[in-house]
Amino acid sequence: MPTVPNRISQKVTHFTESVIREMTRLAFQHEAINLAQGFPNFPAPEEIKKAACQAIQDDINQYAITWGAPGFRRAISDKYREMYDWEIDPERELTVACGSTECMISSILALVNPGDQVLVFEPFYENYGPDAIIAGASPVYISLDANRDWTFDFQELEQKIQDAQSGGGIRALILNTPNNPTGKVFSLEELGKLSELAQAYDFYVITDEIYEHIVYDDHKHYPIALFPGMKDRTITISGLSKTFSVTGWRIGYIIAPEDLTDGIRKIHDFLTVGAAAPLQEAGVKAMQTRGQYYEKLASEYRQRRDYLVDVLQDIGFKVWIPAGAYYIMVEISPLTDLDDVQFVDQLIKNYGVAAVPGSSFYHRPELGRRFIRFAFCKTQEVLREAAERLQRLRD
Ligand code: PLP
C-alpha cells in the first residue's frame, strides 16, 4: 500500500498551500477583519455589473472563443491605444484567461522549459514560486532591499545573470509593478536598465501589471513593453480584478508577440478552455472606461493608504509607505519578539485582525520573519474598526 506522500507528485511537495488564502480561512473562523487577502469589500461599478447581468439575460452563456471574446479583445486593444499609445493586434497578440493568475502560469508554461532559470524579485507575490516549480523552472532571486526602500543592486543582478550562463542562461524575468507586497513602483530608470539587460543577455520579461491604475503621489506606472526594443520580448499581464473590484470574476489578459501568443493560447486552451463568456461582455464596458474613473480609484485608495499608514505608525510598526498597489509592509520588531507567523496568529485570535506573515513572500522564510503585510482595499468603516482593534496592541 503506497503511503500518502507517494500518491502525489513530487512537484506538489515542493510548495505549500497559499498562506494568504489560509489567513482568509483563519480570519473567517475567528471572525477577524480580513486585512490579509487583497480583495475589496465594496461594490463593483454599477454599469459593469449591469452589463454582466444583461449578457446572461442575452444568453451569452456558452463557451467564448478560447482565447477571448472578439469584442472584449478589441476593447482591450482600444484602451491600450488610447491610454498608452500602444498598438496591439487583438487577433494575434491578445489572449483572455481566467484572471492574471492563469495568465501568469500559462505564460510561464508556454515560454519556459524544465530546468530554465527565471529571475524573480524578492519579496514576491506568493504565486510566482509555485508557478515556477510547476513549470520545472529554477528561480533565481534578486532581493529588493527593505533598508533601501525596496531598491535593488544592479551589479548583483548582472552578476547573477552572468552566473546563470553556465546553466544555460536566464530565460525570463518575472516582474510585478506596481508591486505586491512592497508597494514599490519600478521607476523609469530601473525599467530602462532592466530592458537593457534583457536585450544584452537575451531574456524575456513577463510582467504582472494588475495594479497599473493604483499608483500614488508623483509615481507613475510604465509598461516595460514600451521601452525601446522590448515589445518583442515582453509578455504583459493585467485584468479586471483590481481595477474594477471584481476579483471573483476571474478575467485577465495577456499581451504578447504573435509567436508567443500562439504558444500561450495552446496552454490556456488545454488548462481552462476559456474565461467566463458573459463576464467578458461586461469586460467590454470595463475597458471602455476612461479618465476620471481611474483617478477616483487611485485617489480613494490613497485616502485609505494614508489612514492605515498613520494608524500603523502610531502603534509603533516600522512602515513602508506604498507607492502603488494596496498593501502595506511593516516591520514588527519594534513591537514584539514573536516571529511573523506567531505574531499574525496572535493578531487574528487575540485582536481580531488578519494580516499575512512576511515569510510567505520569501523563498527562505527566515528572510521575511520581521515583516507582515496589511491590505487596505476595504471601506473606511472596516479600516476604522480594524484600527480600533489594532490600537489595543499599545496596551
Ligand atoms: N498578481 C498580483 C501581483 C496580485 O497581487 C494578485 C492578487 O492579489 C493577482 C495577480 C491575482 O490576480 P487575478 O485576480 O487577476 O488572478
Image (tube, rainbow, N blue to C red):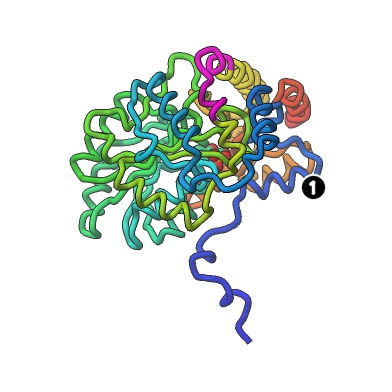
Residue at image coords 27%, 28%:
227
Identify the residue at the far bottom of this view.
1
Which quarter of the rendered picture does the N terminus lie within?
bottom right
Q: What stretch is highlighted in magenta?
A: 284-296
Q: Is residue 105 left or right of residue 113?
A: right
Q: In this view, does 73 lie to the left or right of 157?
A: right
- Mark 1, Cα crowd under 10 Å, few <14 / some 14-19 / many 20+, is few
Would residue 286 be counted in the magenta stretch? yes
Q: Is mark 1 on a helix, strand or loop?
A: helix
Residue at image coords 61%, 47%:
62
For residue 39, what is the image quadrant? top right
Q: Where is residue 85 in the image (x, y as percent from the top left)?
A: 34, 21
Q: Position of residue 380 (x, y in %)?
A: 72, 20
| Residue placed under numbered mark 1 in the picture | 29
Q: Is residue 29 left or right of residue 231?
A: right
Residue at image coords 68%, 43%:
344
Ligand 1 within 8 Å of the CB at mark 1: no
What is the three-letter code of the residue carrying label 1? Gln
Which quarter of the rendered picture does the C terminus lie within?
top right
Q: Where is residue 7 in the image (x, y as percent from the top left)?
A: 58, 76
Q: Quarter containing ligand 1?
A: top right
Q: Position of residue 303 (x, y in %)?
A: 62, 16
Identify the residue at the far top of this view.
292
What secondary structure do most residues of the magenta stretch adopt?
A: helix
Would residue 182 be counted in the magenta stretch? no
Residue at image coords 75%, 35%:
33
Q: Is residue 2 above or below residue 378?
A: below
Question: Which of these two is toward me, 225 or 63?
Answer: 63
For residue 206, what is the image quadrant? top left
For residue 255, what is the image quadrant? top left
Q: How many marks?
A: 1
